[in-house]
Image: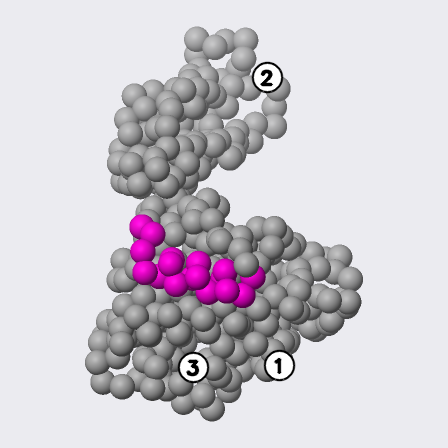
Amino acid sequence: MNNGHALDYAKRLIACESVTPARGTVFDEMEAMLAPLGFTVERFIAGEGDDDPHNGAPVENLFAIRAGPEGSRHFAFAGHLDVVPPGEGWSSDPFGPEIRGELLYGRGAVDMKGSIASFVAALHEISEEAGTISLIITGDEEGPAVYGTRALIDHMQARGSIPELCLVGEPTSVNQLGDMMKIGRRGSVNMWISVDGTQGHVAYPHLADNPVSKLVTILAEIESVRLDEGTEWFQASNIEITDMHVGNPAHNVIPARAEARISIRFNDLHSGESLSRMKREIVEKHGGELRPVISGEPFLTPPGELSAAISDAVKEVTGLEPEASTSGGTSDARFLSKICPVVEFGLTNATMHKLDEAVAVADLDALAEIYAGVMRRVFSASE
């Protein structure tokens, strides 16, 4: 498929500056692409507060649906239009899409405006009679994901439009388009640990209580625990110390407080709550306090109809058989997996979040062809 739409759509989306939290112009472009294809487009702002993404700032969300014949299957595509800040040092304007050689450069080219563009291009090849198609598009995936996909799910449930299958267009390919899809993801929990002591002179330790010693003991005990050996589809869970802070400017003073942060990526043998309980026991045993923040629980969509449709479509276009993996970080698929089977598949991820993010123009067209092939297989299975 090379109808020119994928490249045009990608350029239009990249040209919209949409750093998290995204609102406005980029959604105007999205609506302008979908309305001529027969989609009903519903947009809304969720959240309140300022524009600091760490505070859960207001974001825009879009739900678009094109109804097929009565009783036909409902297939959904999910993605995000927000991007991470571009940073300094680009070879060209990060929001000025530019083709150099065989690559299209711009922030969001692969994560994930390019995939969204390819899916919309694929819609030109799918008849309205094939079935019901919806797009679940948020402006809050790269940020705290508080008012994004979760708010969209509430919106879909309220209008009675829950899909039967959902494809998320995250950049899952590694070395070349089509070599990997994600059928699950590990969960993520961050934990802040604090230990209070009594400040004093280092020469008179009996008059003080050093919290650093306690914190070191806590972290050593936490590090000594091996959570599991992994499962059939998941790698072993891991615990990493990501920060330690005392903030003591004096060399001869025992500090009054010590803090640390740990991050745990975990498989489906655990939950965020079970891990929080486990670590809280260790922390409190040594006189500390623990505050956990669960970013997401693990999910798995066992190989089945959707992964088979993706695999067959990829093989038809590229000749590759994508590996079914659960590696990598979290995505909004963790929320969508609660309402229907979900699999992630998209562009190569080598340049995502980097300077001079770029996508091969040929991959945009090939991905559009793959997405069209997936939809044909999903809808033909119901006939």
Q: Nearer the viewer, residue 246 or 264?
A: 264
Residue 194 position within the rendered picture, expressed as x and y whole percent measured from the top left: 41, 31
User: Distance from label 3 to label 2 (Cα)?
Assistant: 73 Å
Graded by Cα atoms within 10 Å as few (under 14), some (14 to 19) or many (20 or more), the crowding at tag 1 reads few
Q: Report the quarter where the N terminus lies.
A: bottom right
Pointer 1 residue: 4
Residue 263 position within the rendered picture, expressed as x and y whole percent measured from the top left: 44, 37
In this rendering, the label closer to the viewer, 3 or 2: 3
Question: Which residue is pictured at 71% across the width and 66% down the height?
Answer: 103
Chain-order first, disc 3 or disc 1: 1
Question: Which residue is pictured at 31% across the width and 50% down the height?
Answer: 302
Q: Which mark is residue 126?
A: 3
- Report if residue 310 lies within the magenta region: yes
Residue type for callout 1: Gly
Question: Which residue is pictured at 39% across the width and 52% down the height?
Answer: 183
Q: Secondary structure at mark 3?
A: loop
Residue type for callout 3: Ile
Query: On the rendered structure, is 114 left or right of 197?
Result: right
Graded by Cα atoms within 10 Å as few (under 14), some (14 to 19) or many (20 or more), the crowding at tag 3 reads some
Q: Report the quarter where the C terminus lies.
A: bottom left
Q: Main secondary structure of the magenta part?
A: helix
Residue 325 position within the rendered picture, expressed as x and y whole percent measured from the top left: 44, 47
Pointer 2 residue: 252
Residue type for callout 2: Asn
- Report if residue 238 lies within the magenta region: no
Q: Secondary structure at mark 1?
A: loop
Question: Which residue is pictured at 41% across the width and 36% down the height?
Answer: 235
Find the magenta span and give its range: 302-318
Query: On the rendered structure, is 51 left or right of 361?
Result: left
Q: Secondary structure at mark 2?
A: loop
Q: Quadrant of residue 9?
A: bottom right
